[in-house]
Amino acid sequence: MNKAITTTRRRAKRLSPEQRTSDIEKAARQIFSERDYDDVSIAEIAAEANVAEGTIYKYFENKRDLMIKVLEHWYQSMISDYIEHVDAIQGAQNKIRYIIWRHLKSLKENADLCRLSYSGLKNTAEYFDSSIYEYNREYTKVFVDACREGIASGELRQDLPIPLLRDLVFGGVDHIIVGFLFNQRDFDVNTSTEQIVGLLFKGIETRADLETKKVESLEQLSDLAERFQKLLDRADQLSGVDSGR
Amino acid sequence: MNKAITTTRRRAKRLSPEQRTSDIEKAARQIFSERDYDDVSIAEIAAEANVAEGTIYKYFENKRDLMIKVLEHWYQSMISDYIEHVDAIQGAQNKIRYIIWRHLKSLKENADLCRLSYSGLKNTAEYFDSSIYEYNREYTKVFVDACREGIASGELRQDLPIPLLRDLVFGGVDHIIVGFLFNQRDFDVNTSTEQIVGLLFKGIETRADLETKKVESLEQLSDLAERFQKLLDRADQLSGVDSGR
Amino acid sequence: MNKAITTTRRRAKRLSPEQRTSDIEKAARQIFSERDYDDVSIAEIAAEANVAEGTIYKYFENKRDLMIKVLEHWYQSMISDYIEHVDAIQGAQNKIRYIIWRHLKSLKENADLCRLSYSGLKNTAEYFDSSIYEYNREYTKVFVDACREGIASGELRQDLPIPLLRDLVFGGVDHIIVGFLFNQRDFDVNTSTEQIVGLLFKGIETRADLETKKVESLEQLSDLAERFQKLLDRADQLSGVDSGR
Amino acid sequence: MNKAITTTRRRAKRLSPEQRTSDIEKAARQIFSERDYDDVSIAEIAAEANVAEGTIYKYFENKRDLMIKVLEHWYQSMISDYIEHVDAIQGAQNKIRYIIWRHLKSLKENADLCRLSYSGLKNTAEYFDSSIYEYNREYTKVFVDACREGIASGELRQDLPIPLLRDLVFGGVDHIIVGFLFNQRDFDVNTSTEQIVGLLFKGIETRADLETKKVESLEQLSDLAERFQKLLDRADQLSGVDSGR
DNA sequence: AATGAATGAGTTTTCATTCAT
DNA sequence: TATGAATGAAAACTCATTCAT
């Protein structure tokens, strides 16, 4: 009973709006990480942030806005040095591998915010209206660009259905994360990355060719073939034996 | 007074429990198709089903149970002749193509129920507790089995990471559907099926390299290797000399 | 402390919607009579009506609707036998007197509802949108009709600006009531009625003309008439002659 | 750094209290003109006045006080040369006509402030406590005085119920204004003035009625009285009977 | 079995006002 | 004197669920 909640919290110190905004957002992120959007009350966030409820509304339109802001900042941080990194990487495959790796890693590390975006955004039309969607577009655009680059460079198939590929990759990652979040299906970021990349690049078919060891790459293989050919021609001349033509 | 005058709102006829259950569920499916789970009230469903609200609770635990039942029946109908069909198809690739095609088709045709499962299941832990998840397991199991079969028959890679492949396929389809539902991104079932299958089987790499360089196939290469072998053997016999340096 | 508010109000007896509606409205009228619209809470009304707050919302859209309903019923009761009564009265002046008298009386007797309509309707555009305004139109129409009748019968001036007269009468009564309600300026219904009617019919001018000319009053005139009568009588006796034509 | 660089939001220049008060009030009047009392926030007024919210509370007790001040100044301006003008007019009817005309004109011209007084003052007891009421007394007193004067001079009826007349006039004008403000019922100041004055002075009765009953007019009545008198006198002479003198 | 009247918990949001700086 | 960040009380409303009839 008398745990004496002497909260007696009286008028929080006057801070700069920036500081206060940041404090509240941090508190919100904290609370939102713990429970679903609907199960969180503004009162709790206010308490966590050590301000009055009204103060929150000075800085954020409403509960939803606050949540959106939390997610936005997360996205921003995810995007921040992302493009830069991807740009620094050579080759479509490398880029794609990095993007997938990084995506899996970000989501796993911020599982709580993933949960928030699942519970807070109604996964419906609401999401597509939100700024989060815009961020997401930006985010996935990097992947799309990498694909385009790969196509241009000849590394990837000319007829690659990029939007579908994007859905496959990000949808697939989504499923992995959801399983991880809500169905305790753990996963290893590196392993999963390799598996996805492997799947995408090699396909799922048995590639008999690939299994012939010795040959390190197809380029080498063709080089070898050429050298064989020359060698054979010369050998034919030398020996006077018809090479079978 | 006389028989002709009956109360306008007649007490719902006493039906068999099965009939009643079915009526209510049908009404629920109808209403749920139109609006999000949270925007639908039991009262509406009762009205649509022409029963009193209380009656619904005689046949269903609660609103959520009713929704689950609706989705369950949908899943059941989706699964019904599904396994049978898949079984009748020969070859992993064919099976997988059929599964993907059918999945896309089912979801697109029942977009309203997809919407329901997005709005009604909180996409969270709740989903994994529901029987819907069980149905889903069963559903995706068909895919997993097809993959296993493909591996066994040598059609698919031995080291295929099946769970991940499943996530990729079903996660990808999910994204396509979500885009279709909430972001008016239309798609053609056949085209998308081909694209997904193409992606999975061929991978995303250019196969070009192999084909453009002299060597038209691995068979040719082995021919060459054979001839070379013979040549070398002969050369060895002739000169005991170094093969051409 | 332990005044033991054992309200333990458990599930009000099941009543017919009509009865319940009426009960709630009565309670609302009671509470609204005591305090201004904004100072009344639904909780209070619910308590007074001995129902749960939610029950109120079963029967009324919202707080405002409830208030409107209270006022509407008041208006209805005011109008009920009103027209009938007015119709039964002969002569514009009599009708108008009755209307004013009745209006003053109704308002004074239902001062509390007057207060409600002052505090609940924002006196602004909102009022003109409300059904109350419609009732009021109906109510004042009786007055307008009486005036028209008076004009038709020649009892009232042909060029009477009826709308303005209506504003004057009902606006004036309003002021009287407001003074009574909020400024403890009591008034007597009969006296005020006479004064208003007097004002309207006689105007405010001194009927100087009448008084300045010989005849100081009708009493004098009748005196003369009496004396004249006697004279004529006597003359008749004297002469049997026609009285002076 | 150097003087040139000043903070964009410059601290409001230190003005004389009078100037500041006036600025704030002007801003308040502006904002209050646009929207109802409840729909206006102190923040807005502060913004309009280019001061901080707190500053307003340095000069005004609270929001209501500020509104009252706005209305007070309006009343003051309405009253300013009012008494003077009325004094300069001769005759009760002329004075009354001028008062009504001016009142209608003022209200119509300042419709926005009328609206404010309807939305800001709760039309209830609150009003009668406010200084606005005092101003109103002063304002209507001019009318009352004009009436008294008219009575004294014999221009108006001795038994004129002045308070009621005042209620009728100002209540009537109120109704006209309210209809104009909230029910788009336009009116012409001059016409309405004439109608009101006409109504008050001539009354609403056909002056004909007096004449239709035997006596066609009061003038005729006095003629008749005179003729009676003469007749009587002559009759007296004829008969030798003393007529009672 | 069917009804449908009754329930009531639970939370966001506003904005006039205060007061530390 | 001016600021503007911080306050916090207060209440309407919903609707899934219950249970007396």
Image (cartoon, coloured by chain):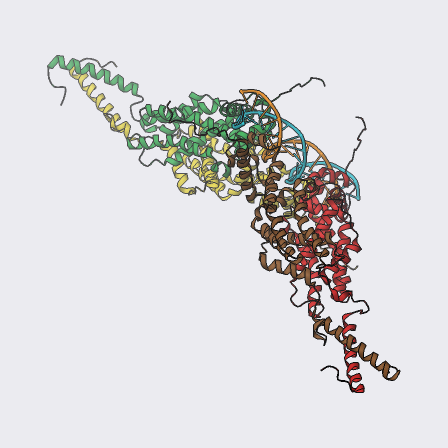
Chain colours: A red, B brown, C green, D yellow, E cyan, F orange
**Residue D88 in view in this figure:** no
Q: Is residue A185 above or below residue C149?
A: below
Asked whether, in this view, residue B63 is left or right of residue A51, the answer is left
| Residue D156 sits in quarter | top left
Residue A161 appears in the rendering: yes
Considering only vertical position in the picture, is C127 above or below C50?
below
Residue sitting nearer the eye, C106 or A218: A218
Nearer to me, B1 or D53: B1
Q: In the picture shown, does residue D82 fall above or below D207?
A: below
In what quadrant of the picture does the C terminus of chain D appear? Answer: top left
x, y (%) of residue B209? 72, 72
Place of residue F14 in the rendered image (x, y in percent of width and height, measured from the top left): 59, 35
Q: Please state the horizontal and vertical placement of residue D37, each as a whole percent of the image.
A: 58, 39
Q: Image check: A224 left or right of A54?
A: right
Residue found 71% across the figure and 59% down from its top: B156
For residue B234, above or below residue C167: below
Q: Specify the quadrant that holds the N terminus of chain D.
A: bottom right
Q: Residue furthest left?
A: C240
Q: How many marks?
A: 0
Which of these two is toward me, A87 or A223? A223
